[in-house]
């Protein structure tokens, strides 16, 4: 993988060509095809292929493919994106083509906004907040309350109104090839809606100016931030494909510590919570991030939802949650996990199953550095299940769940209560994934 500072320029020169024969064999499913017979696929009207993961279930995922001219937009600024998204209650199919990088931290006139701009008029200051809730005087038994917490909440609300973009039903948000398309500093919120496609976008620098201190979180307390790059809350039929997620340009190693804990300004990369269902996450790159993908926001999420397919993605420089799954039926296949340390991000684990999650992890490839422990690729609290097959570690067939169980006091169950049938593109061997996914994943490879 190239360094973040060079990634976008290199992607803009890539052209992805996959032969029809390869696609017919299932190797290139979900990848745009260009050849003399088929011509160029229209990315903006493309829909999820049949049997391509859980999002193809039922009526499938078509996004805004039926949009008329009045609901087809090309946007390059935050203000244009807000206008194109319209009202969350408007279910008319729409296509939003993102051209170039949109900076979410700008006002309607395009002026750059800073954390100080969001704090202005609220009475919040970090120095005052730190003084008010210092555990030495405030204690550790309750969440912050009072004037500075109210001020922090007000400042965070001002930022949220500017950087959170609400995506309506029947929408495709697609990056224009060759333009370095993406959203910097923003969050796409897909909440309570059906049928959304997000493709070919580079999500970077999603940062919370005003993390909250929680002294009751863990043994020593934690700073918790509020924004994911893409968040699904009660959403159904969502296809996230060929996107890149990264903390760049501000990595966690640059975060200061207050009260002895990291002042964490990043939350999730792509979180799927609040009984979201029928989701396919394919051919994305997840890089330089800590809490990357949460499936199920609490152990008490109701059963019957959170059905997610995760395939042909690259995970590199990821600390944890790749993903962390609760409750649902999650199929994780043909992914490449590079768990070497990158930009200070040290892997704790890749896949975590808890709260009766039923996970099938098959034909994935892990690259583990010398001295790395295979037993730490999987994690659990003993309440989930992972069925593992066909997985490779450094090219060698490895039962990653057995390795975890051999070293853990809380065994992870190895049987699940379902069998995947929506598996278009599943490759029966993981051995070629490091090479093949290097040029077929992430933003900027579609033409």
Image (tube, grey):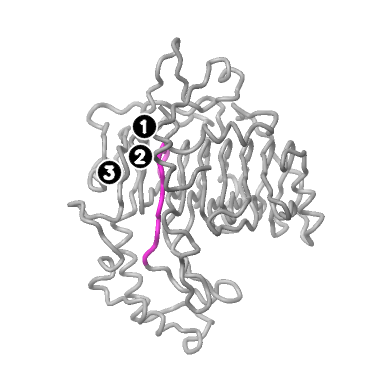
Q: What's drawn in magenta, residue-wise?
A: 192-209
User: SS class of the residue under badge 3?
Assistant: helix
User: Considering only vertical position in the picture, is 66 above or below 330?
Assistant: above
Q: Residue 236 at x, y = what percent?
A: 47, 41
The circle drawn on residue 177 is: 1
The alpha-carbon separation of the residues under discs 3 and 2 comes to: 13 Å
Q: Is residue 76 covered in magenta?
A: no
Q: Are marks 2 and 1 in contact (CB under 8 Å)?
A: yes
Tell me residue 290's x, y (percent). 54, 57
Which residue is drawn at the image coordinates 36% and 65% (left, top)?
209
User: What residue did someone put label 2 on?
Assistant: 181
At 45% from the left and 19% from the top, the residue drawn is 34
Residue corresponding to mark 3: 81
Q: Are marks 3 and 2 in contact (CB under 8 Å)?
A: no
Q: Dot 1 surroundings within 10 Å: few (below 14), some, or many (20 or more)?
A: many
Mark 2 surroundings within 10 Å by alpha-carbon count, few (fewer than 14), some (14 through 19), many (20 or more): many
Q: Is residue 251 left or right of residue 75?
A: right
On the image, which quarter does residue 13 sit in? top left
Residue lying furthest bottom? 137
């Amino acid at each position: 993988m190239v360094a973040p500072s060079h990634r976008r320029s290199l992607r803009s020169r890539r052209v992805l060509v996959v032969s029809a024969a390869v696609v017919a064999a299932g190797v290139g499913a979900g990848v745009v095809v260009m050849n003399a017979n088929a011509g160029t696929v229209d990315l903006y009207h493309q829909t999820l292929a049949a049997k391509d993961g859980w999002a193809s279930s039922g009526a499938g995922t078509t996004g805004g493919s039926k949009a008329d001219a009045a609901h087809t937009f090309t946007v390059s600024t935050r203000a244009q994106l807000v206008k194109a998204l319209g009202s969350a209650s408007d279910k008319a199919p729409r296509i939003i083509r993102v051209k170039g990088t949109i900076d979410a931290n700008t006002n309607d006139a395009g002026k750059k906004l800073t954390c100080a701009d969001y704090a202005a008029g609220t009475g919040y200051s970090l120095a005052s907040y730190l003084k008010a809730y210092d555990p030495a005087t405030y204690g550790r038994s309750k969440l912050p309350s009072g004037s500075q917490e109210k001020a922090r909440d007000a400042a965070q609300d001002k930022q949220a109104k500017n950087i959170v973009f609400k995506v309506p039903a029947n929408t495709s948000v697609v990056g224009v090839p060759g333009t370095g398309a993406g959203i910097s500093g923003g969050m796409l919120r897909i909440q309570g809606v059906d049928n959304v496609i997000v493709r070919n976008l580079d999500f970077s620098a999603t940062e919370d100016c005003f993390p909250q201190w929680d002294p009751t979180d863990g043994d020593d307390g934690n700073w918790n931030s509020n924004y994911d790059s893409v968040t699904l809350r009660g959403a159904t039929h969502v296809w996230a494909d060929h996107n890149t997620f990264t903390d760049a340009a501000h990595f966690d190693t640059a975060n200061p510590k207050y009260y002895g804990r990291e002042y964490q300004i990043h939350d999730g990369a792509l979180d799927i919570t609040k009984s979201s269902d029928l989701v396919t996450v394919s051919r994305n790159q997840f890089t330089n991030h800590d809490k990357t993908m949460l499936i199920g926001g609490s152990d008490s999420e109701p059963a019957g939802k959170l059905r997610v397919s995760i395939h042909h993605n690259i995970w590199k420089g990821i600390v944890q949650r790749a993903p962390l799954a609760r409750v649902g039926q999650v199929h994780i296949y043909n992914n490449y996990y590079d768990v070497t340390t990158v930009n200070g991000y040290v892997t704790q684990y890749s896949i975590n199953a808890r709260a009766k999650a039923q996970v099938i992890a098959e034909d994935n490839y892990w690259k583990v550095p010398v001295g790395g422990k295979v037993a730490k690729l999987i994690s659990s609290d003993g309440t989930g299940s992972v069925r593992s097959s066909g997985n490779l570690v450094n090219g060698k067939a490895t039962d990653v769940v057995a390795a975890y169980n051999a070293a853990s006091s809380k065994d992870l169950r190895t049987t699940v209560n379902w069998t995947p049938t929506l598996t278009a593109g599943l490759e029966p061997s993981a051995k070629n994934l490091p090479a093949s996914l290097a040029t077929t994943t992430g933003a900027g490879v579609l033409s």
